Image (tube, helix red, strand yellow):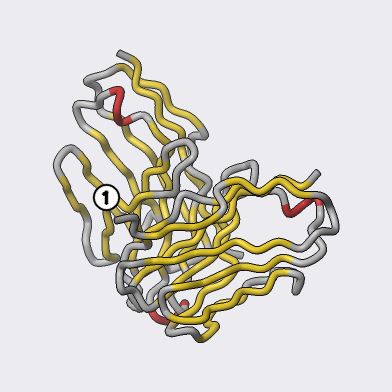
Amino acid sequence: DTAVSQTPKYLVTQMGNDKSIKCEQNLGHDTMYWYKQDSKKFLKIMFSYNNKELIINETVPNRFSPKSPDKAHLNLHINSLELGDSAVYFCASSQWQSNQPQHFGDGTRLSIL
Amino acid sequence: SQKIEQNSEALNIQEGKTATLTCNYTNYSPAYLQWYRQDPGRGPVFLLLIRENEKEKRKERLKVTFDTTLKQSLFHITASQPADSATYLCALDGGYSSASKIIFGSGTRLSIRP
């Protein structure tokens, strides 16, 4: 009965590789997000999708490409991984209204060797 | 540029006391302010939301105030318990004009000692 689930929980890989993180929500929300939390614990938004349409695209390198096959899924693909990509990536979902809380997954800890 | 500051990186208080966390912001006019709790290895969990025209909001032992003149929100936990130990994040929500973008502070790590 997990609300927002993302896989994998841990991802350890070599610099230069390509990897994907998957996210699914069963809350019936129409908006999904990807956040990056760095070592200083700042949670920064990367992307937001509403009904499969890209709404927010922060200044993220184009090596990062989100894909939303349907409202319940938002995946994140990262090409040519760099050391600076090491962080915890969180997926979240909410209803498309500004006063709605966001529901987060438990994060994917990405470590680049 | 927009900036959010949570004044203490860490706060350590005695069980039973009231914990007060501060969130200050600049260059922003949020329509709403949210507070989240984050435990180690977990994602943030929503606690409370307060609107710009509300001064105070309560939920059980939690109380949030919002002063748009001071550009500050205070988050109080009364009768604190060791189980309240976690990192607390404030988040600003600008309303529809921000295309549902929320800006998070870096959090305050609260430790309640028995």
Q: How many marks?
A: 1
- Residue A41 image-quadrant placement: top right
Q: At which x and y percent is residue B6? A: 48, 43
Which residue extends farthest left?
B60
Query: Of all residues shown, which one is farthest toward the top?
Result: B114
**Residue A109, percent from left and from top:** 61, 46
Using the image, determine if residue A49 lies above or below residue B7: below
Above or below — where is B114 with respect to B62?
above
Q: Which chain does the residue under circle 1 lie in?
A: B
Q: Position of residue B68 (x, y in %)?
A: 35, 60
Residue A108 placement, left or right of A19:
left
Please give the name of the residue rendered at 29% of the width and 27% of the height, measured from the top-left corner: B83
Residue at coordinates 49% horizontally, 34% vertically from top-left?
B8
Q: Residue at x 64, y 42 (%)?
A: A39
Which quadrant holds residue A21? bottom right
Q: Which residue is mark 1?
A: B65
Residues A74 and A54: in front is A74
Element under disc 1: strand
A6 or B101: nearer the viewer: A6
Q: Position of residue B63 (x, y in %)?
A: 22, 44
Residue A45 position (above or below residue B85): below
Q: Residue at x 33, y 77 (%)?
A: A97
Q: Identify which amino acid the numbered label 1 is placed on.
A: Thr
- Residue A55 as seen in the image, left or right of residue B19: right
Quadrant location of the N terminus of chain B in the rendered image: bottom right
Tell me: residue B112, above or below residue A18. above
Q: Decide: few, some or many residues near mark 1? Use Cα within 10 Å; few <14, some 14-19, many ≥20.
A: some
User: Is B90 displayed left or right of B64 in the figure?
Assistant: right
- Say which of B58 and A62 sits in front: A62
The image quadrant where one finds the C terminus of chain B is top left
